[in-house]
Amino acid sequence: MRAIVVTLAFIAGCTAAPEPASPAPHAAAMAVTASCGGGVTGASQGVTITAEDHVVRWRQPTAQAERTMTDLGEDAAFAADIRRQLEAMDFANIELNEPGNMTCALTAGDHTLAWPQGGANAPTAVVAIHQRVFEATAGN
């Protein structure tokens, strides 16, 4: 009798439903950066929302200079709102790569859109999010 119970327990374990696959990383884990730069010196500046929801302002006075960064603090609500807007517009499937002398860019995860500063081809919604992130301070 004991052998039957053990055998049935073994069979039940072998026929159990497989564990679900791990979910793909959620958009909440992606960094978002709004930046502008270029020109004669290659200077650039921007704001990055880190994967940990910190708002970090950075500047690089020339292309060869060290980047200085200032962590403005965590702002989970702002970060979540920006990521929601990017997801709603299907940002990852928008294609725009038109750098200019002075180029602005919006990056979410590993996807970047780039356009000449003041360029007319950048989608209005993308420019609005870029501006919102670029002007961010913690506690928006």
Image: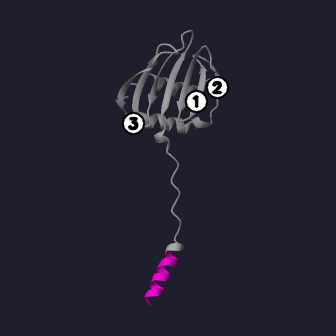
Q: Which image quarter: residue 76?
A: top left
How many residues crowd mark 2 within 10 Å: few (<14), some (14–19), many (20+)?
some
Circle 1 — which element? strand
Residue 112's tag is: 1
Residues under labels 1 and 2: Cα distance?
Answer: 8 Å
Q: Which residue is denoted by mark 3 in the rendering?
A: 77
Q: Amino acid at mark 2?
A: Asn
Q: Which residue is denoted by mark 2 in the rendering?
A: 97
Q: Is residue 70 above or below residue 3?
A: above
Which is in the foreground here, disc 3 or disc 1? 1
Give the residue at the far bottom of this rendering. 1
Query: Residue 135's x, y, as percent?
Result: 44, 22
Residues under labels 3 and 1: Cα distance?
Answer: 23 Å
Q: How is the image coloured?
A: one colour
Residues under labels 3 and 2: Cα distance?
Answer: 29 Å
Which span of residues is magenta-colored? 1-12
Q: Amino acid at mark 1?
A: Thr
